Image (cartoon, rainbow, N blue to C red):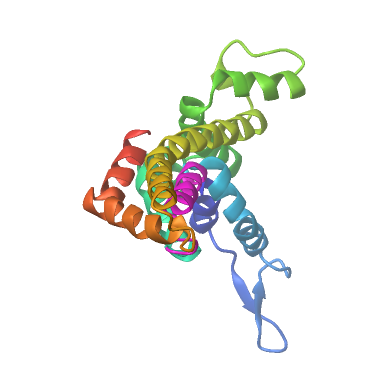
Amino acid sequence: MTVLALILAAPKPALLPNANGLEIAGNGTVPWTIVFLLTFLTLLPALLLAMTPMVRLLVVFHFLRQALGTQTAPSNQVLMALGLMMTWFLMQPVLMQVDHDAVEPFRMGQIGGMEAINRGVEPPKHFMLHYAREKDLALFASATLPERPAKPEDLPMRVVVPAYMLSELKAGFQIGAVLFLPFLLVDLVIASITTSIGMLQLPPVIISTPLKILLFVMVDGWNLLAGTLLKSF
């Protein structure tokens, strides 16, 4: 996200017409901005998952769908879109800080490209350090650094990013497990009732699934789930 903003803010090279009437960069080569932009777009999905709350959101949404027993409803596209919008909502303060510290000074010509990248990395790094567990940070720090830094802010991004992802996976599984319990209780009650009255021809899941959906709708489950996820950050 930081690199994309810096690329878009970078001055464009002058274009000159060649013998075939096509416009090329003033130095006679393909503009490096286009090369960096295409490379960044290729890595954007991985960066989005690695440096934002999207991992936790998608894990929780997956657990919810499995607990409801709806299989493919909501679809993956719907859950991905919801996770993306909630991620944008949560990351907006971080993006505004990146724009203030790095993009605007670079656009005004006050700092160079490398300094802008170094400044732009700091807000996402502080965000990830806030939610990364010390145990996960120590795991990757001991595997890649000869000696542990005095404070977490001195850790490089190659340590912070995977530690943050592990912490988000743990948090997502914790929320998903708690979310799963009420629906598991409904399944157990329905299974015991159908077995006790001798309804062996009808699978209990056929009865429990509509009841779980009805229960989720009656308690306004999507609102509660979204509120809980937002408050977890």
x 37%, y 43%: residue: 90
Q: Which residues are magenta?
A: 54-73
Q: Nearer the viewer, residue 160 or 217?
A: 217
In-front residue for pair 79/221:
221
176 displayed left or right of 25:
left
Q: Give percent across and percent down for residue 123.
A: 46, 34
Marker count (numbered)? 0
Q: Nearer the viewer, residue 217 or 163?
A: 217
Magenta stretch: includes residue 8: no
| Residue 117 appears in the rendering | yes
Relative to 52, is 162 above or below? above
Residue 109 in percent (x, y) is at 48, 46
Q: Residue furthest top?
A: 150
- On the image, the x and y values in percent for residue 136 come to 61, 24
Q: Position of residue 52 (x, y in %)?
A: 49, 43
One can see residue 106 in this view: no
Q: Is residue 59 magenta?
A: yes
Q: From what the image shows, is residue 3 above or below residue 26?
A: above
Q: Residue at x 52, y 50 (%)?
A: 6
Which residue is depicted at the point 60% across and 60% down? 41
Quarter of the image with the C terminus is: top left
